[in-house]
Amino acid sequence: MDLTDSSEETRALAIYWGRTKPMLSLSLLSTTAWITPTASSTTTLTPFFKRALAMSTMTTASQPAIVDAVAAGKYVEVHFDDGAAYRFHSLWLRDACRDEEHVVGGAGERYLTATPVGPSGVSAENVRAASAEVGANGGLHVTWNDASLGPHEMAADPPRVSRFRTDFLRMYAEVVGEKLAAGARSSSAVHEDLAFLTPYSGFPSARAPKAEEMRLWKAADFAVPTFDFHEVLDPASDANLNCIESVLYHGGAMIEGCEEPGEVALRRLADDAFGGLQKDPTRDIANWRIVRKEGATSVSYDHLKRLNQHTDSSIPPHGVPALCLLMHYEEGTGTNTFTDGFAVARQLEAEDPEGYRLLATYGYDAERDFVASRVDSPQEYNRGLIVSTQPKLLQLDDTGALQRIQYNEVFRTPLTLPFDVFPKWYKAFNRFVELVHSAEYERPVPMHKGKFFLMNNWRVLHGRAGGLASSDRVLVGGTITREAIYSQARRLLRERRPGGFADVSQEEELDDEEEEERLRSRPRPRSRLRLRLRPI
Ligand SMILES: [Fe+2]
């Protein structure tokens, strides 16, 4: 049995969506998408998988099939039943193969002995397809030429055959293949359940969120999604996935119902529901802690002062700030302020298109000393870190759509804009900041002990209202990277597929009775965004 992780499909989706050409026919909630029995193992299927395969025949109308395959040395031609045909580089196939002889099932790692690059048993420059055929399961089997299987100390006997699932090839074909014949395409239904993650895939070409994937708001109409702490942490509930989707759709969400507030609860929620907090190298623990301090020099730690709206810089990995910020009131009360930066940007673009363009073209200079800026923190910082950046305030995707906002006034340093650009850039910048802090856009949200607020740090700016915090206010929190959120959402989606294949190795051990029970009690398919929206 050859079962591979869904990450390949998700990657393919990201590639597609990143290239603005949705074309997927594969139903990602179909059980069949994740099963590829090899010819040799078909007869040993457990009843569970036999049933899963039987289910697959019910959905073949939406599944691609290979009708012919031709080995042509450096290329392999694959013809699909929808009339489309593609030429793949043989080397691409050799390199991309994810069958059980090329990827370690549990770890998801390539076998270094089978990869065609570096010290291995495969010679990349000599790779040729000796034969290609449609396997018994409908997949593609490619046999490699002897000359490519050079002896090497790492691999006395490298794999001679690569096996590919049909849906895998069909998904990648338009991205990496050369189209050979015009023909009917598969229906291009992008699965709604995954589409919302596309802007956060991390691919360089990842598109910005579409208008329909966000609900932009002004102060008066921000309907804050609210979730229950225990439900979000309950693996049987949809709340975790719905919460992530809400944060990306609405820009933020409240999480209530934590009976024992504090750092332990913060880390539990962050670790179990959102992929974990981003670790700052200057301190030993991941979360920050803000406690009132008399005479604080940093505005962050002077709880009575207003803190202007900003996005958190944290430690931008590769220049990209963390996608989310999670804050939690351990003690006391206060009022935090939130602004939908995308809504503000939309207004600015309407008022001053040239200024909008300048903010998206010219970065501003910034520098943060991660130790000095935390001089008032009760936490210990044991090593220095100074990050200098020049981010664009408005960051666009390849098509010019707004993808991310990055702005924190306190760390801004002297601008290095060209003489003739500066006045126009600054005019737009000033207007943006004015709108961000205006009563029209800035939404005050009362907070108290036990509450969490999770926000989209690429879109929503946050701050603190002045004079409204209690003297015992203790705020803890931290940032969560794009990678962590994306990974968590992807895992949840995989687990919540009907008959989910979260841990296939265990499922193979199930006998008939257990299998029946499992199918009865499997997690329900996730419904579309079910939220409690209420005024706060
Ligand atoms: Fe902040």
Image (spheres, helix red, strand yellow):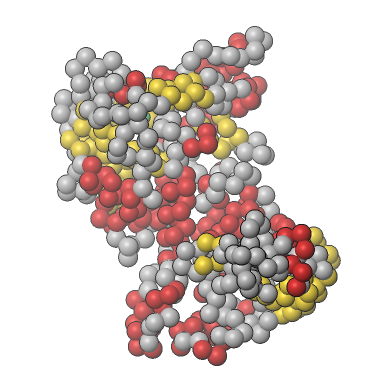
Can the viewer see residue 443 in this picture? no
Q: Which residue is the extreme one toward the bottom? A: 43
Total tally of numbered discs in the picture: 0
Q: Is residue 379 left or right of residue 54?
A: left
Q: Nearer the viewer, residue 207 or 73?
A: 73
x, y percent for residue 307:
33, 22
Q: Nearer the viewer, residue 434 or 286?
A: 286
Q: Residue at x 36, y 79 (%)?
A: 518
Quarter of the render that holds ligand 1: top left
x, y percent for residue 330:
20, 38
Q: Residue at x 32, y 62 (%)?
A: 235
Q: Is residue 313 left or right of residue 535?
A: right
Q: Residue at x 43, y 75 (%)?
A: 505
The quadrant in which residue 253 appears is top left
Can the viewer see residue 163 in this picture? yes
Q: Nearer the viewer, residue 448 or 117?
A: 117
x, y percent for residue 250:
43, 43
Q: Residue at x 66, y 85 (%)?
A: 136
x, y percent for residue 63:
64, 74
Q: Quadrant of the C terminus?
A: top left
The quadrant in which residue 143 appears is bottom right
